[in-house]
Image: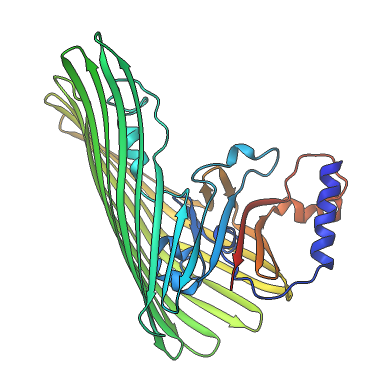
Amino acid sequence: MLKRVATTLVVVALVGGTALADAKMGGVARQLSMGGAGARGLAVNPFIWDDATQMYINPAFGSMYKDYAWINVGGGGLTGVTTTNDGYGLQHGGMNFSLGNNLTVGTILSHDGTSANTVAGAIAPGGFGINTGLPVTPVEVLQAMASYGINNNTSLGLRVLYGWTSNDAINTPATGTNEFTASVIGATAGIHVNLGSGNAIEGSVSFASSTADDKAGQGTTALNATASGTEIGATVRAKLKVNNKVNFIPTAAFISASGDGSNGAATPTTADVTGTALGIGAGLDLTVGDFYMAGGVSYGMVSQETTNSTGGTSTTTKNTNTGFPIIQVGGEWAFVDWLTGRAGYIRSFTTFTTENTAGGVTSETNWFQGGSTVILGSYNANNLVVFGLAAAFGNFSLEATVSESVLRRGFGVIGSQDNLNSFGYVTTTYNID
């Protein structure tokens, strides 16, 4: 009953409150509400040009978000307690501070956009190279970034990251020291250029290197399982003015990754992994008064090839997912000056291909499936349409996806006794300016 009373009070506050329009809305909740696809703790609709989420991809956007703080609070299921959906990787944010007119410095906390934990997991308990069996906590990543406005039209950005985890157990002299360590180091550089007359271009390049070691000290004989991985990526988008209401937005993104590992045995089991992801899209954004819509169509491909070898025997598996068309579209409009409604649509027409090669024999399977599932940590929305609300109170904003079931129930949600959740993923921001 208290939960329903609290919900009622919040609704009344939203309907009857007043607010200024100084907040800069944006973040994962907004992206999810407007057709964003989830990956690595983020959701992105690439045809939304301006959004705080872009700082995770291109640090040059820090110049557009000076003296700004944000928290992606996370989110859970349609019903029940959602505390298990919180924590590292699901809840992350950051802050920026301007140092003069040109320089902005900041940080991103509790977010890891690399494959460091995948590399560590290859030789951790459950992986192929267990030596010590030591439990391993996720790699903890810290990020620092800076952006610099060369002039009113061009901004440069740089972000560096470092992450690590470790565990050791000492038992001498019988078994020596067992130790598991993993680390990652990386950097992203970006640029944003205002070309004038409403046109702009932005892009970024990134690099990350991860290593992991699982060392078992057994007397004078040490077994050392190792794994490593390297990732490089690039993104580019342009905004080209069509008229006073419409912009054309082409996008492209590319990621290449490779890794290898060994269990350190006398006759080792090894793994070699290569992967490639490519996305190319074209879309439009439309602004008419307080209404904004952005959407388009993309081609996406993700391919990964893994070869496992023991002695002279090897097995190769290649998985390729190809999506076309991938449709993403979202809109937002102001009910009143301080309350914004949102709706988004996402659909991918995907072909899945798996090839297995062992002993000179190759088998292949192909299947097609249309899907709209957006999985972001434990947030799972398997719907064509996602709704959202955003409220701005002075410099502060509170944004959330909205359960379709709550909308269908209407006023019946007030006083009901079940455990239906009104909101899903939540983001908060504060614009210090």
Q: x, y (%) of residue 147?
A: 39, 70
Q: In the image, residue 24 lies at what x, y percent?
A: 59, 71
Rendered location of residue 420, percent (x, y): 75, 43
236 or 168, nearer to the observer:
168
Q: Quadrant of the C terminus?
A: bottom right
Residue 52 visible in rendering: yes
Name the quarter where the N terminus is drawn.
top right
Where residue 341 sits, quadrant-wise, is: bottom right
Q: Residue at x 46, y 67 (%)?
A: 46
Q: Residue 382, relative to residue 324: is it above or below?
A: above
Instruction: Residue at 36%, 25% (x, y): give it.
Output: 125
Q: In this view, does 135 lie above or below 198?
A: above
Q: Which of 208 and 347 is in front in this view?
A: 208
Residue at horizontal 64%, vertical 78%?
291
Whether residue 273 appears in this view of the structure is: no
Task: Return the residue nearer the eye: 337 or 165.
Answer: 165
In-front residue for pair 312/415: 415
Q: In this view, does 79 lie to the left or right of 85?
A: right
The residue furthest front is 100
- Locate residue 176, reporting x and y percent: 25, 15
Picture quadrant of residue 215: top left
